[in-house]
Image: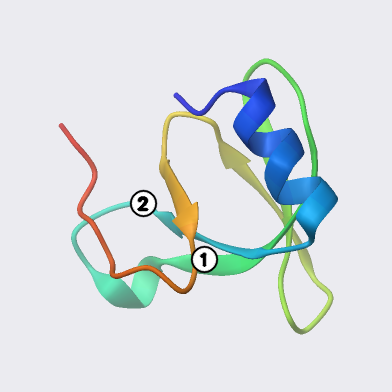
């Protein structure tokens, strides 16, 4: 699970993140961290839609290569 400190760094920098949910690259979510709580993270996608995702997914900067989540 991603830490509060990492999420806060992404939020303050405004850097796009990639959320890897499974092994299919088309299911990745890219966007900016908006808010979070103990179990969820809100990501604003480029089309301005907001997605609520579980914190257990893999979060990384969008510019880095895709890494499959550990299962």
**Dot 1 and dot 2 residues touching (CB under 8 Å):** yes
Please identify the quarter of the rendering in which residue 25 is found.
Answer: bottom left
Q: Is residue 13 above or below residue 63?
A: above
Q: Is residue 8 left or right of residue 7?
A: right
Q: Is residue 35 left or right of residue 61?
A: right
Residue 50 in the image: x percent, y percent? 78, 61
Q: Secondary structure at mark 1?
A: strand
Outermost top residue: 38
Residue drawn 77% across the image and 84% down it: 47
Q: Is residue 69 above or below residue 32?
A: above
Residue drawn 43% across the image and 29% down it: 56
Q: Is residue 25 left or right of residue 39?
A: left
Residue 37 in the image: x percent, y percent? 75, 22
Q: Secondary structure at mark 2?
A: loop
Residue 29, label in figure: 1
| Along the viewing direction, whichever of 48 and 7 lies nearer the viewer | 7
Q: CA distance from mark 1 to mark 2?
A: 8 Å
Residue 71 in the image: x percent, y percent? 15, 32
| Count of numbered tags | 2
Q: Is residue 4 left or right of residue 23?
A: right
Please identify the quarter of the rendering in which residue 13 is found.
Answer: bottom right
Residue drawn 69% across the image and 49% down it: 10
**What is the crowding at mark 2: few (fewer than 14 residues within 10 Å), some, or many (at least 20)?**
some
Which colour scheme appears in the figure? rainbow
**What is the crowding at mark 1: few (fewer than 14 residues within 10 Å), some, or many (at least 20)?**
some
Outermost bottom residue: 47
Residue ID for mark 2: 21
Q: Quadrant of the N terminus?
A: top left
Residue 49, label in figure: none
């Amino acid at each position: 699970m991603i830490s509060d400190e990492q999420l806060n760094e992404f939020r303050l920098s405004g850097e796009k993140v990639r959320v890897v949910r499974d092994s299919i690259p088309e299911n990745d979510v890219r966007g900016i961290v908006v808010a979070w709580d103990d179990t969820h993270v809100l990501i604003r996608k480029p089309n301005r839609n907001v997605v609520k995702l579980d914190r257990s997914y893999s979060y990384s900067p969008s510019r880095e290569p895709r890494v499959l989540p550990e299962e």
